[in-house]
Image (tube, rainbow, N blue to C red):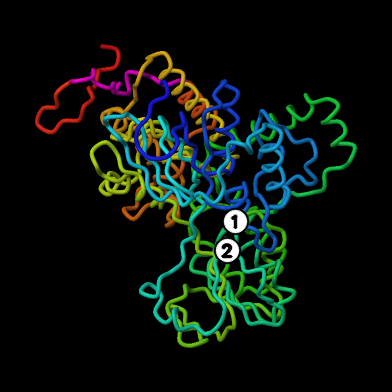
Amino acid sequence: MGEHKGGNGPHVRVAVVGSGFGGLGAAVRLRREGITDFVVLERAGSVGGTWRDNDYPGCACDVPSHLYSFSFAPNHAWPRAFSGQEHIRAYLEHVADVFGLRPHIRFDSEVTRMAWDAERLCWDIETSSGPLSADLVVSATGPLSDPKVPTPAELPGLDSFPGKVFHSARWDHGYDLRGKRVAMIGTGASAAQIVPAIQPEVGRLTLFQRTPPWVLPRVDRGISGAERWLHKQLPFTAQARRGLLWGVRELQVQAFTKRPDQLGLVERLAKRHMARAVKDPELRARLTPDYRIGCKRILLSNTYYPALTRPNVDVIASGLAKVDGSMLVAADGSTAEVDAIVFGTGFHVTDMPIADRVVGAEGRTLAEAWADGGMRSLRGASAAGFPNWMTIIGPNTGLGNSSMILMIESQLNYMVDFVRQLDVLGGRVALDARPAAVAAWNERVQRRMERTVWSTGGCTSWYLDANGRNTTVWPGTTSEFRSATRRVELSEYVVVRAAAPGTKTIGGATDTEKVEAGA
């Protein structure tokens, strides 16, 4: 893919969207491949992605630190077994510095539109800081990047609430919670960390719980100076630690994906964990889930249950239905008068906002292409009709029990081979996933999904889209996914080449030709 002119703004070989783990990882791998003609488009003013945006009180990772880092950038200085948000964000800043990524990053550059130019075989990209074009787009916007907040239509009266309202991922640090009456809406991973963090300082905390989560102990501890020294002096010890953490989680996958009935023992551990902290049988009943553990994300916390037993905390076992002035009314009629509402209501996961901004070869947005059957792509990366456009953390690449960094690195392997294939093909060329290949891959994934706890566990989770289809989670091990994304199979793509100069268009067809891969 040589340089070519046309369109507005500068042209780069690769445009990466987002500077979280996925975007920075893509930048490192491109540089290692000898590619320096790329830009990282970041809508904010600093790197970090979800670990920049989510800086709420108590924010931390529920994956062990030594597994939640790049294999090519080990961190021997993790202070705890499970690291806090500030340490993970600092790690990502460190990666950006050490690998020389900052000259490639264009901050305050939100992508507003990307359109495929079928004649020039490149993407025209509009951003808040100006236009550019790219041969290849790597979208690493992440599934946990755009908060989901109820609209006034979904939650009547919200627009007239006189107090403070914000989402957990847009925490207002200028608002003083001390002594205030605060409502926490939702009981997901963020809420389980926020509740114990703010409970001691608020006047009253009311938790609106639509569905109780399963909570297991968090086996966290400080990592000693001796351990850190050992890992730095003898790197193989850190590798062994990472390998052990990975192996244990690989062994656990089968219970989630093939034999959910084996999870009964884990449920008993979770109930014992609750019983130790919650002595009130009535409260315990409200906090006990009625679905199989693992169907929704399992939370890890030693402080969530104790916080709920404190005298200034109320648990309303019902979702928020409407707002009447400063009074919140639950679906079961329960009420609470509050000064502030904190929404822990998750993110736009199965309806990625970026999909509305990407216009493919047929003039349709990615959102329109996915409107019928939900999000789907080839090996979690390539969508049919969107040549030279790849996703990091795409459809069905999420995990229920291990580190997403493992999945990201697998997709980066696929991205690098995608670039190599374009080089081998030579000239102005693009790869467009075959609809049949996308369909076959997704049929295989969904067939495997039928046996999983996410499909059989009896819950409704954020893993499911509006049609009840799980387009989020990978129904297998991380090693299986790595094997499936080791290389690009050209037979799964149509090779799109620019037509020779002067070629006539027929019936409005574009000035390109599609070549059957391998023909």
Residue plotted at (52% across, 52% down):
144
- 495 within the magenta span: yes
Q: Which residues are magenta?
A: 487-502
The tag on residue 154 is none
Give neighbour class at mark 2: few <14, some 14-19, many 20+ (Cα, 10 Å): some
Residue to which mark 2 is pinned: 170
Frontmost residue, 33 versus 107? 107
Q: Where does label 1 land, which residue?
A: 53
Dot 1 amino acid type = Asp
Nearer the observer, 90 or 215: 90
Residue 228 location, quadrant: top right
Helix, strand or loop status at disc 2: helix
Give above or below for 498 relative to 312. Answer: above
Q: Is residue 464 left or right of residue 499?
A: right
Please tell me in which quadrant of the rendered image residue 197 appears: bottom right
Residue toward you, 158 or 104: 104
